[in-house]
Image: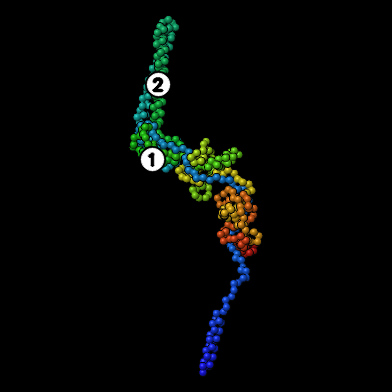
Amino acid sequence: MRLSFMSITTGVIIAAVGVWYFEHPKPKGPDTRPAAATVTSVVTEAALSGNFPVLLRAIGNVEPMATVAVKSRVQSALLQQHFTEGQMVKEGDLLFTLDGRELAAQVAKDKAMLARDQAILSRSRNDLYRAQQLLAKNAGTQQALDQATADVATGEATIQSDQATLDGDQLRLSYTKIYAPISGRVGAVNITPGNLVNASDAGPGLVTITQMKPVRVTFSLSERELPQIQAAAAGKTTLTAKAFPHGGVGAVATGKLNFIDSAINQASGTITMKAEFANEDLTLWPGEYRDVQLELGSHANAVSIPTVALQAGQKGSYVFVVGADSTAQLRDVTPGLVNQDRTEIVAGLKAGERVVVDGQLRLSIGAPVRDVAEAARTKVSDTTGG
């Protein structure tokens, strides 16, 4: 009985071990077969060749060519205002009318005084003529002739004084009509009709006129760029300047550089320049800031790429170039000028080579790539039968 029991027990154990071994097979070793290379989707663009503009950028301030504070030149009451605030006016437009009745009365008095003295002068001349005739006939005296001559000279001087007084009062009377000295936009009115104004009044005046067309933009560039600007200006009549929205893109106005300061600011190491803009559409507003771009010419046959393709490494700048075998290769390049979203490549790249503009962070040297844009173009071409 004991042997039978032990045999049965041993058989059970062996069967149990067999089941466990079947359910837990021996682990396999590492798979040494080469894995298939992963293809990375990227977007590429071809390097272009052409004229690459030489541009200098700065932040400028829009300034009016002229600003005039309109003031009264005589003491009088302000009767009438002939414009509305914020209106565009032309040079010579009537702005204000002052009370000129007192000055008009003075002018009338001056005219009467002049007429009286002209009559006196006419009588004095007649007296001089008679004195000359009497003396010629030995019927008069030299003293009478001398007196008549002096009376005529006095009368002529009086007439000149009267005329000067009349001219002065007429000029002061004309000041009761206040005209726009320049064309521009009027600001807020500081003194309203009914108030007394005077030439000696302190303050901003009756109103301020700001010239809006043309305007100038003042900006500063580094002194290191001055030789380049001078060289460009020597070969051209004028240098073109463009104004952009502050922090934006798309030129809103085109003007010409018309002023380079005579001295460099030693504190900042910059030189001040000014460009004039016609501003016919009033795009530029005095007091606002604009990005300014000064065009100095262009580099002929320059290779350029989208700036986003350019990467920075420990050895300098580089790009990923996709060759005919559809693999990515790292290429060291020497960047040059930057114009908006494109960068000039001075060395390291040829026109026509395709550089990666999206997907660079997923790439490694020699990695196979798939150009998403090219695949999309191919698909469209197959669909349309092109």
Residues at marks 1 and 2, CA–CA distance in whole angstroms = 40 Å
Across and down, in percent, residue 94 comes to: 42, 36
Across and down, in percent, residue 386 comes to: 65, 62
* Residue behind mark 1: 189
Mark 2 is on which residue type? Ser
The extreme right residue here reads 324
Q: Residue drawn at (63%, 52%), measured in percent from left and top?
A: 348
216 to 23, vertically: above or below = above
Mark 1 is on which residue type? Val
Question: Badge 2 local density, few (<14 within 10 Å), some, or many (20+)?
Answer: few
Q: Can residue 269 be seen in this view?
A: yes
Across and down, in percent, residue 43 comes to: 58, 59
Dot placed on the residue nearer the N-terminal end, 1 or 2: 2
Q: Is disc 1 in contact with disc 2, using a CB cutoff of under 8 Å?
A: no
241 to 131, vertically: above or below = below
* Residue behind mark 2: 161
Q: Can residue 384 be seen in this view?
A: no
Task: Give me the disc on residue 384.
Answer: none
Q: Residue drawn at (37%, 29%), measured in percent from left and top?
A: 104
252 to 180, vertically: above or below = below
The extreme bottom residue here reads 1
**Which mark is nearer the camera, 1 or 2?**
1
Q: Nearer the viewer, residue 258 or 110?
A: 258
Q: Residue drawn at (48%, 40%), measured in percent from left and top?
A: 267
239 to 345, vertically: above or below = above
Across and down, in percent, residue 383 comes to: 62, 64
